[in-house]
Image (spheres, rainbow, N blue to C red):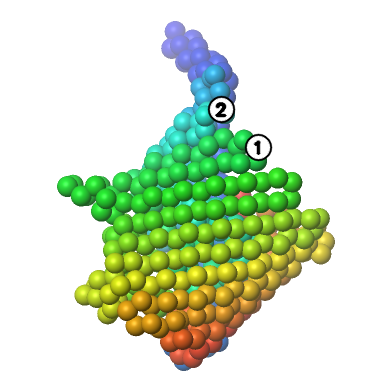
């Protein structure tokens, strides 16, 4: 009887699984390599660094067919340091992503949990950081606009529309969770995306109240000389961005622009000034597959800032180049070079990867390997 019951139960579960068409996938990325920097605090350095071309991660994602064009979905994604084995994103178990949701082919998808915001998800792919092998070394100065996806949003409700005529939209709200103050630590994020043939267009906007409290990882630390003090002292932070790309044959050309604003600065919290600080970044990126397995890439960006309280105009120029060779669909080796020049009182700092240079210039050269699974 026990044997019959076990077999019957197994057959029942198998039948239900087949009807529901459920699936769960394990995936991940491991990147590691050596980076040489020309100047960190007055000295050159060799460093073994992981998660540069893409952040190291492993995750689980799954879907379940509920019938009538509905499906349930979930995703759990852990970030980690491949050289030390420690968890990223402040030690969180699933610090990159952790959400559950429902999707309908006609009405779109709604998800709940820790999720990405619009600038990183929609504008990032047009940047050198998002499309070339240099990864986070190629991010805009200090990754102040989050195209390198230094942070994610907690307690978020996110809606993504179906694609109609090549156009889709996204809207997100992150609850601050502070009793008696609904807006404190909250965030809003929106995006529009259009694709037709080889053409891609996107526009996005994110705003965060009390960013140093709402998003505690990485971006606002004082060691990030580009935006650390501004981010720690800001009562409100916002980024608007647009991106465009066109692919023809083996060539892809893209451009992006972002406007970042650190507002309501509290001089008592580290900024040493009040008012607001803004940064505008424009970037051009090009890549070419010489062969199906060899990609060359280059980019140039310029960032112009304005400090309202002092009239200071910090600015940065950055040039990037990379060579990427694919050993297989999921394994590649690469080399990259990046140079940043700072002026107007700014500090040359390829943050969040390197610490600040003692001069107006900083150079980083890297060789690495990336494995996807």
Could you tell me residue 292's position as x and y percent?
80, 57
Could you tell me residue 337's position as x and y percent?
64, 77
Q: Nearer the viewer, residue 224 or 261?
A: 261
Q: Which residue is drawn at the image coordinates 46% and 11% (left, top)?
A: 5
Q: Which mark is residue 106?
A: 2
Q: Nearer the viewer, residue 82 or 8?
A: 82
User: Given this view, does label 2 or label 1 mark the residue nearer the observer?
Assistant: 1
Image quarter of residue 367? bottom right
Q: Is residue 352 left or right of residue 31?
A: left
Q: Quick one: label 1, few (<14), some, or many (20+) residues within 10 Å?
A: few
Of mark 2 and mark 1, the one earlier in the sequence is 2
Label 1 sits on residue = 165
Instruction: Name above or below for residue 152 compared with residue 64.
Output: below
Q: Is residue 340 left or right of residue 290?
A: left
Q: Secondary structure at mark 2?
A: loop
Q: Which residue is drawn at the image coordinates 62% and 77% (left, top)?
A: 319
Could you tell me residue 73's position as x and y percent?
49, 34
Q: Which mark is residue 249?
A: none
Q: Is residue 123 left or right of residue 246?
A: left
Q: Which residue is drawn at the image coordinates 65% and 71% (left, top)?
A: 299
Instruction: Name above or below for residue 72 compared with residue 201.
Output: above
Q: Quadrant of the N terminus?
A: top left
Q: Nearer the viewer, residue 274 or 294?
A: 274
Residue 205 in view of the camera: yes
Q: Nearer the viewer, residue 131 or 80?
A: 131
Q: Secondary structure at mark 1?
A: loop
Q: Which residue is drawn at the image coordinates 50% and 76% (left, top)?
A: 304
Q: CA distance from mark 2 to mark 1?
A: 13 Å
Q: Quick one: label 2, few (<14), some, or many (20+) residues within 10 Å?
A: few
């Amino acid at each position: 009887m026990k044997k019959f019951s076990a077999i019957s139960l197994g057959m029942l579960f198998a039948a239900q699984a087949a009807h529901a068409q459920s699936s769960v996938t394990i995936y991940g990325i491991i990147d590691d390599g050596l980076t040489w920097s020309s100047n960190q605090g007055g000295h050159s350095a060799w460093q073994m660094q992981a998660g540069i071309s893409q952040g190291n991660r492993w995750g689980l994602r799954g879907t379940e067919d509920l019938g009538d064009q509905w499906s349930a979905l979930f995703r759990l994604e852990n970030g980690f340091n491949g050289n030390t084995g420690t968890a990223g994103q402040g030690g969180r178990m699933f610090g990159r992503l952790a959400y559950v949701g429902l999707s309908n082919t006609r009405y779109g998808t709604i998800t709940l949990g820790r999720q990405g915001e619009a600038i990183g998800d929609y504008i990032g792919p047009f940047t050198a950081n998002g499309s070339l092998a240099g990864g986070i070394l190629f991010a805009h100065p200090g990754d102040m606009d989050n195209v390198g996806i230094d942070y994610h949003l907690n307690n978020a409700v996110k809606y993504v529309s179906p694609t109609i005529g090549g156009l889709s939209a996204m809207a997100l709200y992150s609850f601050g969770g502070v009793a008696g103050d609904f807006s404190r630590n909250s965030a809003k994020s929106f995006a529009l995306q259009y694709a037709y043939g080889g053409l891609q267009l996107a526009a996005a906007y994110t705003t965060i109240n009390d960013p140093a409290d709402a998003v505690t990882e990485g971006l606002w630390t004082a060691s990030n000389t580009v935006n650390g003090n501004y981010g720690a002292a800001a009562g409100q932070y916002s980024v608007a961005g647009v991106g465009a790309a066109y692919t023809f044959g083996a060539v892809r050309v893209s451009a992006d622009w972002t406007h970042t604003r650190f507002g309501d600065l509290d001089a008592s919290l580290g900024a040493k000034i009040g008012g607001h600080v803004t940064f505008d970044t424009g970037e051009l990126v090009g890549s070419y597959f010489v062969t199906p397995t060899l990609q060359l890439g280059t980019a140039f960006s310029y960032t112009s800032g304005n400090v309202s309280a002092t009239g200071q105009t910090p600015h940065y120029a950055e040039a990037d180049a990379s060579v990427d060779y694919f050993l297989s669909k999921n394994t590649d080796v690469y080399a990259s070079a990046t140079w940043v020049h700072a002026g107007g009182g700014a500090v040359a700092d390829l943050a969040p990867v390197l610490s600040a240079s003692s001069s107006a210039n900083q150079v980083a050269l890297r060789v690495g390997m990336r494995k996807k699974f």
